[in-house]
Image: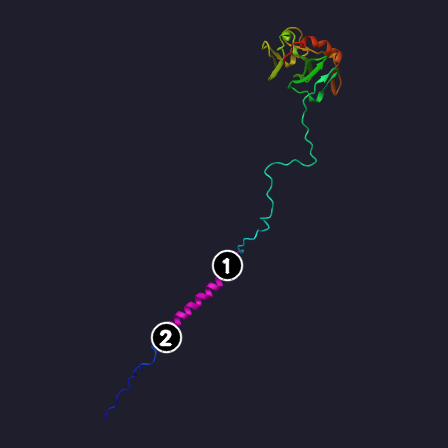
């Protein structure tokens, strides 16, 4: 009797081995992917600040003003325009006089006068009436400063600051000399009596 080799025969209800292996591999891959995503997410949350719509402490810092604000107790000293002396002595503060001519209005017996004061190149303070010794009758013979000279508004004559109070006669400001005023460390005083005498040259004045 011949022996027949026992060849294994696959039964119909036995699942295939190869599909089962592929399924296990897929499950393992998915599991590894989920674990990797979880690890990455955890590290990201630890390494970066969370994003929130709530205002942070930085957002609560008030914006600085764009314009300067003066201190509460600061007092700004602004030079004041001379107030017209009326029927009284004219007192000129020495500390207000600079190389730029200052003009001081005066009213004597209803007539408007004006005195100019300026610091000359030699540092002395010069004074004069702001009207021309020649052009005063026109009413336009007063002076305005142009650089280091005074210019007559009637004839255009130019008069250097160093000549104020020194030069007499001709087209120049009527000088107020040392014997016609009182000078001390703080002020220059021009008596009302002398101012009253000068009203005659300001009767037609139109400054």
Depth check, front residue: 88 or 103: 88
Residue 166 seen by the camera: no
Q: Which residue is mark 2?
A: 20
Q: Quadrant of residue 178?
A: top right
Is 192 part of what is drawn in magenta? no
- Residue stretch in magenta: 23-48
Label 1 vs label 2: CA separation?
37 Å
Depth check, front residue: 134 or 159: 134
Quadrant (top left/top right/bottom left/bottom right) for the N terminus: bottom left
Q: Residues within 10 Å of mark 2 (few under 14, many from 20)?
A: few
Q: Are marks 1 and 2 in contact (CB under 8 Å)?
A: no
Q: Quadrant of residue 177?
A: top right
Q: Earlier in the sequence, mark 1 or mark 2?
A: 2
Q: Which residue is mark 1?
A: 44
**Secondary structure mainly formed by the magenta segment:** helix
Residue at image location 73% in from the left, 9% down from the top: 197
Residue at image location 46% in from the left, 63% down from the top: 37
Quadrant (top left/top right/bottom left/bottom right) for the C terminus: top right
Q: Which residue ends up furthest to the left in the rendered image? A: 1
Residue at image location 42% in from the left, 70% down from the top: 28
Q: Is residue 66 above or below residue 7?
A: above
């Amino acid at each position: 009797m011949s022996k027949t080799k026992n060849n294994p025969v696959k039964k119909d209800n036995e699942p295939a081995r190869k599909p089962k292996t592929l399924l296990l591999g897929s499950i393992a891959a998915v599991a590894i992917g989920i674990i990797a995503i979880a690890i990455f997410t955890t590290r990201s949350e630890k390494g970066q600040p969370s994003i929130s719509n709530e205002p942070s402490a930085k957002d609560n810092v008030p914006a600085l003003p764009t314009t300067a604000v003066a201190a509460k107790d600061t007092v700004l000293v602004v030079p004041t325009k001379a107030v017209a002396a009326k029927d009284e002595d004219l007192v000129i503060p020495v500390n207000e006089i600079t190389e730029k001519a200052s003009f001081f209005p005066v009213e004597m017996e209803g007539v408007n006068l004006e005195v100019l004061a300026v610091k000359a190149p030699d540092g002395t303070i010069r004074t004069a009436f702001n009207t021309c010794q020649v052009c005063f009758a026109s009413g336009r013979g007063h002076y305005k400063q142009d650089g280091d000279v005074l210019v007559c508004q009637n004839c255009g004559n130019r008069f250097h600051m160093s000549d104020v109070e020194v030069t007499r006669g001709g087209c120049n400001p009527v000088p107020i000399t040392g014997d016609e005023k009182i000078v001390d460390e703080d002020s220059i005083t021009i008596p009302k009596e002398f101012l009253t005498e000068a009203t005659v040259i300001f009767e037609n004045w139109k400054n």
